[in-house]
Image (tube, rainbow, N blue to C red):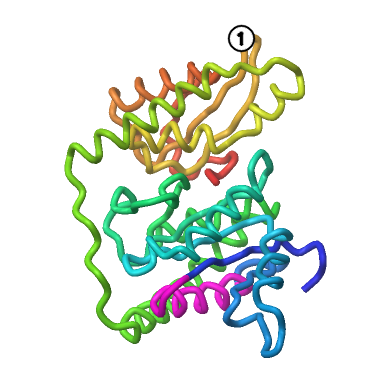
Amino acid sequence: MADNDLKIFISWSGELAKAVTREIRTWLPKLFDRIDPWMSDIDIQAGTRGLQLIEDRLNNSSFGIIVVTTENQHKTWLNFEAGALSKRFEGGSGRVVPILVNFDDFYQIEGPIRQFQGVMLDKDGMRELLQSITNIAGSDWPMIEARFEWSWKDFEKAIEVARAEAGPQPKAPDVTESDLLQEILARLNSIEKRGLERPSSARESRERYGNTDTIIDILSTVGIGDVSSFELGTSSTGMTVEVSCNTMPEPKQAAAARKLASREGYSMTFLHEPTGHGSSPS
């Protein structure tokens, strides 16, 4: 691997996560030309100082994947690596994406990993993960998407084999309506607090302009998920975001999203454009 390849750190704990991580690590280089995915079980050779190598890889990675199962979500080592990745990318352009292996919903996640925007281990979730990697790596999304469609069936079969070989897993925790409401309110409060911190300089304004995670948080909070792309811009009145949707959101969802976007300093519009062009959501 070349020094300028995108280095991806994949964190795991437990037999199911280990097997899934191996498949992901093998699969990603088939889709991207210039990436270097790494997991400790494969890449640490006998006789080396494992902890030092893990630390070195953490410090030199620009993207993090956390493979989360019902077995490992409370494991100390997994949460330690998640915290280290979060600190590594704080204020930068890197991203951390949890992959939920045997959960029905992201709200079933407990503990520190909930701070990240996760994806399910299914076709839609993996497409979203690849879009995130594409944005960080600067790759050509149509090419990556074509490779994704070509390779998906084989990858899906490999994951099913990994699930079967790992055996029975703990049941995902039940989530009540009260739990969901508290989580939504907490995310809304977080977005509102960020919206109060207005840029105080041109540099801060540019940093805010490029923060696509803010838009993703807004859309996720109000339950708008069928988005093909969005494009950030500016107008005479401030910053804008144009969201292209495969399926248009409900009027109440769109109104809530516009309100939250306004607090962040954006004017948000929605377009029904199944093949829309723009910046794919990361």
Q: Is residue 230 above or below residue 122?
A: above
> Which residues, given as a range, are shown in magenta?
13-30
Q: Amino acid at mark 1?
A: Thr
Q: Which residue is mark 1?
A: 237
161 relative position to 66: left or right: left
Query: Which one is in front, 258 or 149?
Result: 258
The image shows residue 112 at horizontal and vertical percentages of 44, 50
Give me the residue at 53% from left, 59% from top: 80
> Along the horizontal axis of the image, is 169 left or right of 73?
left
In the rendered image, residue 190, in percent from the top left (x then y), is placed at 45, 29
Q: Residue furthest right?
A: 3
Is 32 displayed left or right of 262 in the figure? right
Pinpoint residue 60: horizontal percent, then vertical percent.
73, 60
Q: Residue at x 65, y 80 (%)?
A: 43
Q: Residue at x 53, y 33 (%)?
A: 214
Residue 110 visible within the image: yes
